[in-house]
Image (cartoon, helix red, strand yellow):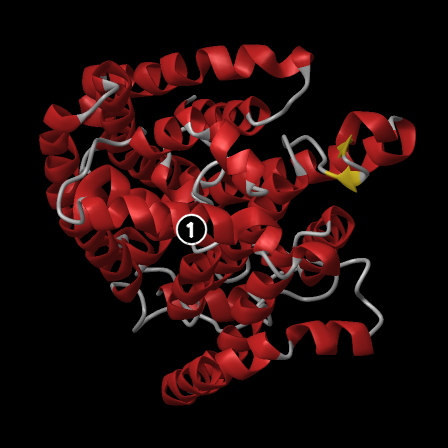
């Protein structure tokens, strides 16, 4: 039941992000759960043959992260986080592919419906126990805070879209409408600006990439050019649309304290741009400077995955991770129209939060699954489609077409 074990791990990671005392156990056992998955991966090695090599691209990054442990102020914690990241990259792709070999489409269906169930339960609780799924008058579902729910929705929306692109006919159109509705309603209710803009970027690029990759690149270049113009007039645009309350205009100017965090991070980077202090160092740095940063209007971590990687693993660690990360998406770009749009959207999202630098959260595991779906050759035998037209409204597949394609 390795598929069920992987889904259980995904669920535990999600619950570990919650602030509710009832789910405190999830945070206590998630590292043990990952070790358990690694144990079965080694003991039952024949089950996972042939093995997936997603981790190979990230070996230079892991080597650098390990080397910089000699400069760590929190050696034991940094060593565990580095091991955890490597174990996640090793175990999750192999469990996904093994589940696919033995369960085919059911593996992805069960995984996607688990995520939808997590969101749906949060929406139901909003009407039954609104205080249980709210923080500072904002909806957070089963996640720990509204921005966490926004991140979950970003990654899960991309994951579900990529899964349907990789495996056509995975869901009926009605099921797709239901899934997207639950995700988008969750985004609207949580009020995450990052989620709104990231999903918009993904949908826009995906639309143009389905037309032509060249058109998609032109649109991306155009977006980069007009970005500064849009940013300079963003407040006026929001006011003209009468959305200033939803987008919390009063916190937009300093990006909810992120500008303070970024400035502080850059100051520390400038002191030692080449040398990192081990994975987890940035969280430690911001924690010991909590009082100083709070006076300036910031609470939390660096809120930027790139600054965090740079502080933790130095400039070369950051570059080695980005190269491995982008190559993982490029590997599937020629075959899947969602690959490059997903890359753009995830990189954009990581600019505003540090989720990508941690392994045991409900976000990074989804990213690793996305990478696996796009880069693994085991899916290349699946007939491709740019949309869901292989499934009728009543849920029946066009079996003749699919069987012919398989033949």
Specify the quadrant of the image occupied by residue 245. bottom right
Mark 1 lies on residue: 262
User: Where in the figure is residue 130, as x and y percent of width and height?
Assistant: 86, 31
Which quadrant would the N terminus be assigned to in this image?
top left
On screen, residue 356 above or below 361: below
Residue situated in front as seen by the camera: 211 or 29: 29
User: Where in the figure is residue 33, as x and y percent of width and height?
Assistant: 40, 16
Left or right, 206 with reference to 235: left
State the SS at label 1.
helix
| Crowd class of label 1 (few under 14; some 14 to 19; many from 20; radius 10 Å) | some
Residue situated in front as seen by the camera: 317 or 175: 317
User: Where in the figure is residue 203, as x and y percent of width and height?
Assistant: 57, 71
Q: Is residue 65 visible?
A: yes
**Residue at 44% from the left image edge and 22% from the top image edge:** 5
Residue situated in front as seen by the camera: 406 or 281: 281
On screen, residue 346 above or below 112: below
Left or right, 313 with reference to 180: left
User: Where in the figure is residue 159, as x and y percent of width and height?
Assistant: 50, 52
């Amino acid at each position: 039941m390795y598929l069920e074990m992987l889904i259980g791990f995904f669920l535990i990671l999600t619950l570990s992000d919650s602030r509710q005392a009832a789910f405190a156990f999830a945070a206590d056992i998630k590292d043990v759960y990952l070790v358990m998955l690694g144990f079965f991966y080694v003991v039952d090695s024949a089950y996972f043959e042939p093995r997936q090599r997603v981790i190979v691209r990230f070996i230079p990054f892991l080597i650098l992260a390990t080397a910089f442990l000699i400069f760590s102020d929190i050696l034991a914690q940094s060593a565990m986080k580095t091991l955890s990241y490597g174990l996640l990259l090793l175990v999750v792709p192999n469990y996904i592919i093994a589940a696919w070999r033995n369960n085919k489409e059911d593996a992805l269906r069960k995984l996607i419906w688990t995520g939808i169930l997590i969101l749906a339960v949060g929406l139901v609780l909003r009407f039954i126990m609104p205080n249980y799924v709210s923080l500072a008058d904002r909806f957070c579902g089963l996640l720990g805070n509204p921005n966490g729910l926004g991140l979950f929705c970003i990654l899960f929306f991309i994951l579900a879209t990529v899964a349907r692109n990789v495996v056509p006919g995975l869901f009926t159109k009605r099921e797709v409408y239901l899934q997207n509705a639950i995700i988008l309603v969750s985004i609207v209710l949580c009020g995450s600006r990052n989620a709104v803009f990231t999903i918009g970027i993904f949908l826009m690029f995906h639309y143009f990439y389905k037309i032509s990759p060249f058109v998609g690149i032109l649109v991306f270049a155009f977006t980069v050019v007009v970005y500064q113009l849009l940013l300079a007039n963003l407040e006026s645009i929001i006011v003209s649309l009468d959305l200033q309350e939803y987008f919390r205009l009063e916190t937009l100017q300093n990006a909810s304290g992120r500008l303070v965090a970024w400035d502080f991070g850059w100051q520390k980077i400038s002191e030692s741009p080449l040398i990192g202090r081990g994975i987890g160092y940035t969280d430690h740095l911001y924690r010991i400077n909590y009082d100083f940063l709070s006076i300036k209007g910031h609470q939390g971590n660096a809120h930027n995955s790139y600054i965090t990687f740079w502080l933790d693993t130095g400039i070369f660690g950051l570059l080695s991770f980005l190269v491995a990360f982008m190559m993982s998406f490029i590997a599937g770009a020629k075959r899947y129209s969602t690959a490059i749009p997903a890359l753009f959207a995830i990189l954009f999202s990581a600019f505003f939060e540090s989720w990508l630098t941690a392994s045991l959260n409900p976000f990074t595991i989804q990213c690793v699954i996305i990478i696996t779906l796009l880069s693994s050759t085991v899916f290349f035998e699946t007939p491709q489609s740019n949309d869901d037209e292989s499934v009728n409204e009543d849920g029946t597949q066009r079996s003749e077409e699919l069987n012919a394609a398989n033949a």
